Amino acid sequence: MRVVIDAVPLLIRSAGVKNYLYYWISHLRRAAGLNVCDTFPRIGALAPLRHDGSVAGLPRTLSGLAALALANYTPLPVLDLAIGRCDAFHATNLVRRPPRRCRLTTTLHDMTSWLMPELHPSANRRADTAHADLLRRADGIIAVSTSTRDDAVRTLDIPAERIEVIHSGIADAFFNVKADAAALVRARYKLDRQFVLFVGTIEPRKNLDGLLDAWEALPASFRQEFDLVLAGPIGWASGKTADRVHAAHYLGYIPEADLAPLTAAATVFAYPSLYEGFGFPVAQAMAAGVPVVTSNVSSLPEVAGDAAVLVDPRSQKELSGALAELLTSASRRAELAARGRRQAERFRWEKCAVHSWKFFERIAGAPVLGG
């Protein structure tokens, strides 16, 4: 069996989807082999992950983007010719005209464009609207959480039996952060005080204004002892939100190599998002042994389990109260950190890859290895 995965998001600036594809492809290849798990465009060994640029060289990047444009906007059977014979093609939401000679699969990462369209720019909404057509045509769909699957069934009227829930994974680096690595990152970013950390693209869905309001509502004594640190690229946040972020302790984009030690260095991780299909930052913080405050909506309770303080993300009172609870109780932080490490073990990329390969075998009609 040969599976080809659309890897074009690895060539452009991207966050969660790029993180997913990078580690997913790497672990699928370990589980199945490079020759049976190929990519479009064809990329051999992946360069180190960076979210602000391509993981392939310039020639491969330019040729891959050009081929996708030809496939999407001309009648030429570009993808059929480019990928050759395969049993399944796994498309992202960048593909408009998938190949016709193999089974079609895709991953559904979240349903925000349908449930909260006002939080997205028009380009995102157009891409997801086009992806909805592909979702309805797909032979099989991976949903990264039960919450996302249920939203798709309800909103897009896709039969539940065509959607398989396969949780995403967490990079190994988050499970094994050394104390000296965390100390080096603290020094590099001049983090002199204990701090509450947020990591994510600065966009309306992440609810940064709610977090900043909750932080400012805490007694001055908290803000004198602890810092609130924000990290991540500025996405499509409003000018007002961007100004507030820049006025705070804002680190900007964090290279992948620094992300795990930065997360592990935090006293508390805060992620009051309004909607998540999976919520990588929450799972990563739990793996790193950092107590988490996050939202009680969408997939976040599913991912966090009993290992986080869950709040109404639109309630300043609940969010402030949760932050105050953890910042004043070392024992509560230790309890949640231990629970978080156990919960995070559910989200290993190795498990995701094995489950995903069985999914492909089922869709392709091949026998599942081991029965």
Image (tube, rainbow, N blue to C red):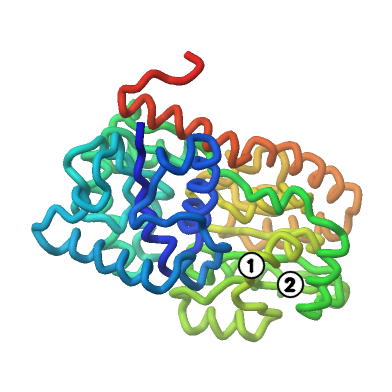
Counting other residues with Cα less than 10 Å from the Cα at mark 1, is it few (<14), some (14-19), or many (20 or more)?
Answer: many
Left or right: where does residue 261 sit relative to residue 30? right
Would you place residue 305 above or below residue 369 in this image? below
Looking at the image, do the residues carrying marks 2 and 1 touch, with CB atoms under 8 Å apart?
yes
Q: Amino acid at mark 1?
A: Leu
Residue at 35%, 44% in the rendered image:
4
Residue appearing at x 60%, y 58% in the figure: 272
Instruction: Using the rendered image of the protein, determine whether residue 264 is visible from the camera's viewpoint.
Output: yes
Question: How busy is the neighbourhood of tag 2: few (under 14 within 10 Å), some, or many (20 plus)?
Answer: many
Mark 2 residue element:
strand
Q: Which residue is mark 2?
A: 228
Q: Amino acid at mark 2?
A: Leu
Q: Which is nearer the eye, 310 or 232?
A: 232
The circle drawn on residue 59 is none
- Can residue 275 be spotted in the picture? no
Q: Please indicate whether residue 263 sits to the left or right of residue 199 in the image.
A: right
Mark 2 / mark 1, whichever is N-terminal? 1
Image quadrant in which the N terminus is located: top left
Q: What residue appears at the point 86 percent right and 68 percent down from the top-left corner? A: 183
How far separated are the C-alphas under marks 2 and 1?
9 Å
| Residue 225 drawn above or below residue 277 | below
Identify whether 221 is placed above or below 49: below
- Disc assigned to residue 211: 1
